[in-house]
Image (spheres, rainbow, N blue to C red):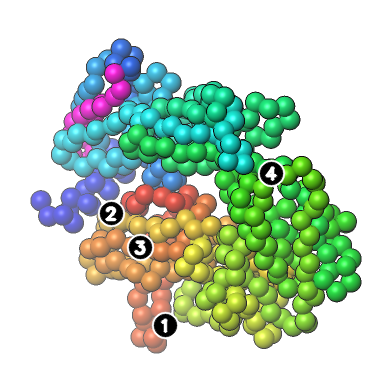
């Protein structure tokens, strides 16, 4: 059978109950590689059909048909599975695993591992070991939380801070560590569990950090200044109050890197080494007033200047035209003529995700912090009745606002579409066909979408009628 015909039949089967009965229904065999302590526990297997709303795990199963099977031992087979995209979940006791499976017309075997390598290390404060409570928990994917949720693992470190914990290999963990000393502030760490025995120390936080932001010329406090920094949870952006004060409940001992951003002021980089200390004197930040003009500063997610940022507005998808905003090596962009407050400005940088902001939002503080990177999105089209010479391109939108057409395209699904540099979080993807008419105008026709995708994401499949 020719590949194009097979893809067409698979798509048609998903939309035609009559043809669905004629396609081969393969057997899916699942083999489990588990820790010995899990051998006597019942396994729960979930196989759920995708509804073409995709998330970071590859597919969403909300409102879709699903099969649940309980079994013992380390293998199970499910016969007569319709071709399509599935979410495969396996639960043993209170632990769960999930992966995305694309089912064709041939039998296949999936292997799922339940291994817990040993993580060991010390909890320290200012270099010295301390007794503490450690709580390790995994973060479930948003669209499959009933399959992915996991029970936290709690450990107590010894008097000198030593601890041991067996964590699921490859799982993303959040560790909440609290010293047993009175008045201790919990510290949070985010990491991926190793695939083999490994070590990791957890240095506890210094005291809460008090910051004061002032005008460098007058010494007056600056209200509404934004302090951008990254902690184990992610990007933090607290604002200063009327006294120019920012109180951060918990900052890790060691290097503290941040950027202060305020309207009509030059952005100020802070690079300090914080140690445990008894005094509560604030960290003073002085900001220089900015000269008038239409420029604004662009910063990477970590707060450093975004040298080489590419900025534009007034994007026209049909003609692929835009108004470019010049930006210099310090990440300062100046359009010359200020865009209207409601106009959308789009920014791209290799170290960040594509960022969409209104001009009014950007000029409110004369700056913008780029979105964290969500990586590339790879799209494989499964064509149905489109003509063989039709070619497709993807258009990416954020909140319904088109931000970028894909540079790559495909014709007859000969190769996938890849869109790099997207932001973390939800975007929408629309698939269009395109051709040039006799007046050299590009004509776009929507053939699929918009489809919601939560980045980062594994490759997705989109059927084309």
Q: Position of residue 332 (x, y in %)?
A: 63, 77
Q: Position of residue 53 (x, y in %)?
A: 44, 45
Indicate which disc, 2 or 4, sits on the residue closer to the N terminus.
4
Furthest residue in direction left, as rendered: 1
Indicate which disc, 3 or 4, sits on the residue closer to the N terminus.
4
Q: Residues within 10 Å of mark 1 (few under 14, many from 20)?
A: few
Q: CA distance from mark 2 to mark 4?
A: 58 Å
Indicate which disc, 1 or 2, sits on the residue closer to the N terminus.
2
Mark 3 or 4: in front is 4
Which residue corresponds to the image point at 74% horizontal and 83% vertical from the top-left? 293
- Which stretch appears magenta? 18-36
Q: Residues within 10 Å of mark 4 (few under 14, many from 20)?
A: some
Q: Is residue 109 magenta?
A: no
Which residue corresponds to the image point at 72% horizontal and 65% vertical from the top-left? 261
The C terminus - image quarter:
bottom left
Q: As rendered, which of 119 and 281 lies closer to the eye? A: 281
Indicate which disc, 3 or 2, sits on the residue closer to the N terminus.
2
Q: Position of residue 147 (x, y in %)?
A: 43, 29
Mark 4 or 1: in front is 4
Q: Which mark is residue 441?
A: 1
Height in image: 321 above or below 427?
Answer: below
Q: CA distance from mark 4 to mark 1?
A: 65 Å
- Residue to which mark 3 is pinned: 418
- Residue to which mark 2 is pinned: 382
């Amino acid at each position: 059978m020719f590949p194009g015909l097979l893809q067409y039949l698979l798509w048609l089967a998903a939309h035609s109950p009559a043809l669905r009965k004629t396609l081969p229904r393969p057997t899916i065999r699942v083999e489990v590689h588990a820790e010995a302590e899990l051998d006597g526990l019942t396994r729960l297997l979930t196989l759920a059909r995708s509804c073409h709303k995709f998330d970071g795990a590859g597919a969403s199963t909300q409102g879709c048909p699903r099969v649940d099977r309980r079994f013992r031992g380390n293998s199970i087979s499910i016969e007569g599975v319709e071709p399509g995209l599935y979410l495969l979940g396996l639960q043993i006791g209170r632990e769960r695993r999930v992966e995305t499976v694309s089912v064709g017309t041939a039998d296949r075997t999936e292997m799922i591992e339940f291994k817990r390598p040993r993580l060991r290390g010390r909890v320290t404060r200012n270099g010295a070991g301390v007794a503490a409570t450690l709580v390790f928990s995994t973060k479930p994917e948003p669209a499959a939380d009933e399959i992915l949720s996991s029970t936290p693992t709690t450990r107590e470190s010894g008097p000198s801070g030593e601890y041991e914990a067996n964590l699921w290999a490859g799982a993303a963990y959040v560790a909440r560590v609290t010293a047993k000393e009175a008045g201790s502030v919990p510290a949070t760490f985010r990491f991926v569990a190793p695939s083999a025995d490994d070590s990791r120390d957890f240095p506890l936080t210094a005291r809460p950090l008090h910051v004061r932001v002032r005008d460098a010329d007058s010494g007056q406090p600056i209200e509404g200044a934004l302090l951008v920094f990254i902690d184990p949870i992610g990007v933090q952006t607290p604002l200063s109050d009327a006294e120019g004060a920012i109180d951060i409940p918990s900052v890790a001992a060691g290097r503290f890197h941040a950027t202060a951003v305020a309207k009509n002021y030059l952005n100020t980089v802070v690079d300090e080494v914080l140690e445990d200390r008894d005094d509560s004197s604030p960290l003073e930040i002085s900001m220089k007033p900015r000269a008038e003009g239409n420029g604004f500063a662009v910063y990477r997610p970590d707060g450093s200047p975004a040298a080489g940022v590419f900025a534009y507005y007034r994007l026209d998808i049909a003609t692929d035209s835009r108004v470019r905003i010049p930006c210099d090596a310090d990440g300062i962009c100046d359009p010359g003529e200020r865009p209207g407050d409601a106009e959308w400005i789009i920014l791209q940088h290799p170290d960040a995700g594509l960022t969409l902001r209104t001009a009014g939002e950007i000029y409110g503080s004369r700056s913008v912090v780029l979105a964290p990177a969500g990586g590339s999105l790879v799209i494989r089209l499964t064509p149905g009745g489109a003509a063989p010479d039709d070619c497709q391109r993807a258009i990416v939108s954020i909140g319904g606002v088109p931000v970028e057409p894909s540079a790559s395209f495909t014709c007859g699904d000969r190769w996938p579409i890849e869109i790099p540099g997207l932001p973390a979080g939800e975007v929408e993807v629309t698939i269009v066909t395109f051709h040039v008419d006799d007046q050299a105008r590009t004509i776009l026709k929507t053939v699929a979408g918009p489809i919601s995708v939560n980045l980062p994401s594994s490759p997705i499949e989109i059927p084309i009628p």
